[in-house]
Amino acid sequence: MSRALHDAATGTLFGVALNYKGLLEQRLAEFEQAPYQKPPVKPVLFIKTPNTRNGHGQPVVYPKGVERLQAGPALGVVIGKRATRVSAEQALDHVAGFTIVNEFSLPEESYYRPAVKAKCRDGFCVIGPELVPVAQIADPHALDIRLFINGEVRQQNSTANLVRGIAQLIAEITEFMTLHEGDVLITGTPEGRVDVQPGDQVEIEITGLGRLANPIVAEQEAH
Amino acid sequence: MKHARIRFQGEVHAVTVEADNAVRLADGRLLGEDQVEWLPPANGSMFALGLNYADHAAELAFAPPTEPLAFVKSPGTYTGHNQVTWRPDNIKYMHYECELVAVIGKPARNVKREDALEYLAGYTVCNDYAIRDYLENYYRPNLRVKNRDCTTPVGPWIVDVADVPDPSSLTLRTWINGELKQEGTTRDMIFDIPYLIEYLSSFMTLQPGDMIATGTPEGLADVVPGDEVVVEVEGVGRLVNRIVSEAEFFAQYKKEA
């Protein structure tokens, strides 16, 4: 991780689930059934605990006993100034910049319960390679996101397809919860998460933000 | 021994707690309970258990879980002893939850139940407030219900493991304005602390300062601005909190940005 990002993104890592239109639409029929009975009204949020932090070029451990592990390409928003009850119009004033996040997860069959076991494993949140200041990105809602496995494109989407854009997320979240300087908002992973295997080189490219690369390694025997 | 974090004259101190909740600073000064601002005694992630008491699960009309149902809280929602928590305007039901909290003392990965207590720094108490009106079925309970600013009082202190010989038989009680509203015992916990440490550390590394909030028994009730809410775990601590309105909170305690 570059020094500037390491210094800027020291806070809590907040994720937003179901924030790509394609992903939400795939699930809408299911969400009308029990136990959900209606689609989400407010942003569906989760926390990547500090043990999940990982950096550019670092290995991501494929846990023993796990059947499937999936990459999670996402645009990361790094908070630069405390945000309590900010409006959408003011929200971007509280952002230090953007980065790439690879929000690793076990596959999620259900969105009913918090996904701690799927999402909070050591090293499951890669952030980097750099912090790109807000002013350098003309439109954060028109960025291509591409996932490469061993050099081959396996998933692609655009931040144009976010259900809630960055300013709206910040406004809705800070209505009840302050975002502090250094917190990172992981704005969502598009539909079509891709399985990875030990030995794979996983890279995410987002327009203007560079390329975040990590090898997947098998978990060693306990010693 | 009891260990706390307080702020006094703008400085944060690690203190020990003596008779009548007086706190002893490292330089030897002794300050009264009301002279200091009590801070949360730990600042890691909190893994909070849902439906971990059989009676409470029944109260909410759920079958008891077969695997721990944990959700995560982050430090922004914590507040200390004798502080305030806000009730949002235009809601129908905000309730307390009195809970015994285990505080992790050293990194814990793949820990077996029989060794689990070696990884504890001690125990504390939390009041895991929830706003029921905001409950949706996605990653339930979600952050809008459980991770609001200053809506999880924690403390007042951490008590040493050795000072709580049997954490599986402690009485939990909650009072609103002096009236006893909730009473239960940690005997009725479905997954006990050693099991929860084994479970969580089986797939992640628990960090020093992380906390496991072990769930609440039955006996929930609504709280409104002006209420004094006291949660107590016998032999661990008595944690006091006052409910304020949304307007009062943002005017006096949390200046809008």
Image (spheres, coloured by chain):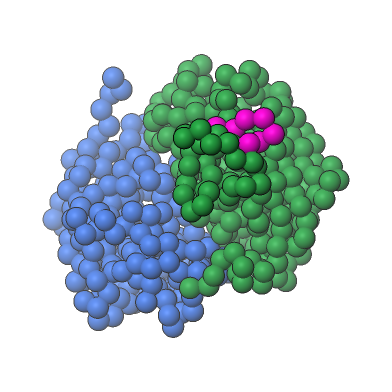
Q: Nearer the viewer, residue B115 or B17?
A: B17
Q: Nearer the viewer, residue A78 or B199?
A: A78
The residue positioned 36% from the left and 65% from the top of the image is A79
Task: Tell me the blue chain.
Answer: A
Residue B68 in view, yes or no = no
Expressed as whole percent of the image width and height from the top left, the position of residue B10 reads: 48, 53
Residues in magenta? B15-22
Expressed as whole percent of the image width and height from the top left, the position of residue A30 reads: 55, 61
Expressed as whole percent of the image width and height from the top left, the position of residue B93 reads: 75, 60
Using residue A40 as the reference point, say whether residue B209 is left or right of it: left
Residue A190, picture quadrant: bottom left
Q: Which of B54 and B37 is in front in this view?
A: B37
Residue A182 in view, yes or no = yes
Q: Is residue B128 above or below residue A155?
A: above
Q: Is residue A133 above or below residue A204?
A: below
Residue sitting at the far right: B179
* Quadrant in which the N terminus of chain B appears: top right
Task: Tell me the green chain.
Answer: B
Q: Which of B25 and B233 is in front in this view?
A: B25
Q: Is residue B159 magenta?
A: no
